[in-house]
Amino acid sequence: MIALKTIDLRNDFKRVSNLISAGEKVLIARPRNENLVVLSESEYNKLEKARRNAEYLEKIDRAMERVANGRVVVKTMEELEEMAK
């Protein structure tokens, strides 16, 4: 990860953009620790996919816990079809 000041980003945006496109992550140092991290869209998409997968696995774990504790409602196919009408 490369750390830069805001002024460095402004002065050399093209070079920094090329580094980010090549997979480098850039930390933009700002006052009061309000720092930013810039990364490529493909890196962002990977992080989002991992976050969504983690959320999905958490939902599955909660559902499995409910099943293990007997907190489920059992319906026959006929009952489900009747409910759909």
Image: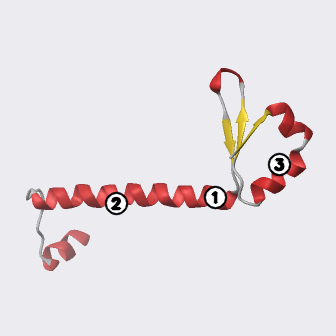
Residue marked by disc 1:
43
Looking at the picture, tell me which residue is in the foreground, 24 or 85: 24
Q: Residues within 10 Å of mark 1 (few under 14, many from 20)?
A: some
What's the distance in space between the residues labelled 2 and 1, CA to CA?
A: 21 Å
Q: Which residue is drawn at 16% across and 56% down?
A: 66
| Nearest-to-viewer mark from 1 and 3 | 3
Tags 1 and 3 touching, CB below 8 Å = no
Q: Which residue is drawn at 40% across and 56% down?
A: 54
In the rendering, at what x and y percent does residue 36 appear?
A: 67, 37
In the rendering, at what x and y percent does residue 6 appear?
A: 80, 32
Reading the chain from its start, which is encountered first: label 1 or label 3?
3
Q: How crowded is mark 2: few (under 14 residues within 10 Å), some or many (20 or more)?
A: few
Badge 1 amino acid? Glu
In the rendering, at what x and y percent does residue 72 appear?
A: 13, 60
Tags 3 and 2 touching, CB below 8 Å = no
Residue marked by disc 3:
16
Looking at the picture, tell me which residue is in the foreground, 77 or 56: 56
What's the distance in space between the residues labelled 3 and 2, CA to CA?
A: 36 Å
Q: Which residue is drawn at 60% across and 60% down?
A: 45
| Nearest-to-viewer mark from 2 and 1 | 1
Tags 2 and 1 touching, CB below 8 Å = no
Reading the chain from its start, which is encountered first: label 3 or label 2?
3
Q: How crowded is mark 3: few (under 14 residues within 10 Å), some or many (20 or more)?
A: many
Residue 55 appears in the rendering: yes
On residue 57, which mark appears?
Answer: 2
